[in-house]
Image (cartoon, rainbow, N blue to C red):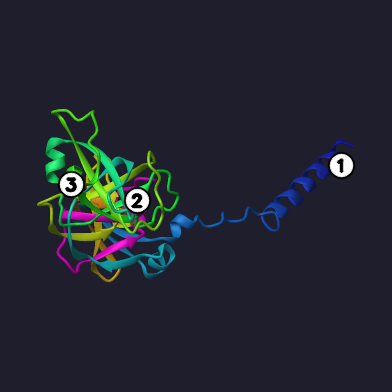
Amino acid sequence: MHAKFHRIVVLAATVASTLGSTGCAKQPAAPNPSQELPSKVDKEHKTVHLSQKASERLQIKVAPLTEQTVFRTVSVGAEVVGSSKSASVVLLRASLHAADAAAVDPKKAARVRAIGSTDADEPGEEAELSDAEDDAVKADDEDDDKKLVYFRIKGNGKPLQPGQRASVEYAVQGSEATRRVVPYSAIIYDLKGDTWVYVAIDTLTFQRQKVTVDFFRGQTALLSEGPPTGTLVVIRGPAELYGAETGVGK
């Protein structure tokens, strides 16, 4: 009786072993998508070389670095104080420090936008510096530290009412300069806050190079230091290249 029971146990173990080595065998794990992006990294030279497949998957896109002649602008709050002698001109008043008031460039048009405007791409109404002596009644709150500056809008297409608040963006005198320009999407920040871009130094090979951002304007970064004009800069996928190079984000 005991021998028969022993043979049954051995037979069951043999069947289980056979099934485990055939149909019940453990299937290989599904490939990790991150492992499908092979790259060669040269950390000393901050360089990443991607395979063709990796480049296609990441949808890397480059564009040449360009130059523009630009000038600095400053935005200040202003109040609509009414019309001047001409009913077709709307007047705005802003309170600025004396040095800032002296820096307003009278040769370049300012831009006026109503506070609360929901259209970020709206260019705004053109405005110019105005002589308060001729065009407006002076306010009583002007002091030695502040100066009241007036801007006037000609042919106001979107009527502004007296007392309404608006933003005036004016150009700063003497700030005109040539700057190298890249889309904001090309800029990478490292853990120290320094700014970088990736440039294409060969087919599918990209090197991280340091840049100095002078200022941002919308979705554009204006550089005071960086690669020469015409350099191909990565404008889509720089964060992925940074992750491949440094391991940050993995």
Is residue 47 in view from this perspective?
no
Front residue (pair 233, 142): 142
Q: Start and end of the magenta stretch?
A: 220-249
Tell me if mark 1 has few (under 14), some (14-19) or many (20+) residues whose alpha carbon lies within 10 angstroms of its own.
few
Label 2 is placed on what type of residue? Gly
Residue drawn at x 35%, y 66% is 61
Label 2 SS: helix
Residue 56's x, y, as percent?
41, 68
Residue 4 circle label: 1
Residue ranking furthest to the right: 1
Type of residue at label 3?
Asp
Snapshot quadrant of residue 8: top right
Return the mark for residue 55: none
Residue underneath mark 3: 131
Question: Is-magenta flag for residue 209?
Answer: no
Secondary structure of the residue carrying numbered label 1:
helix
Which residue is most to the left? Answer: 174
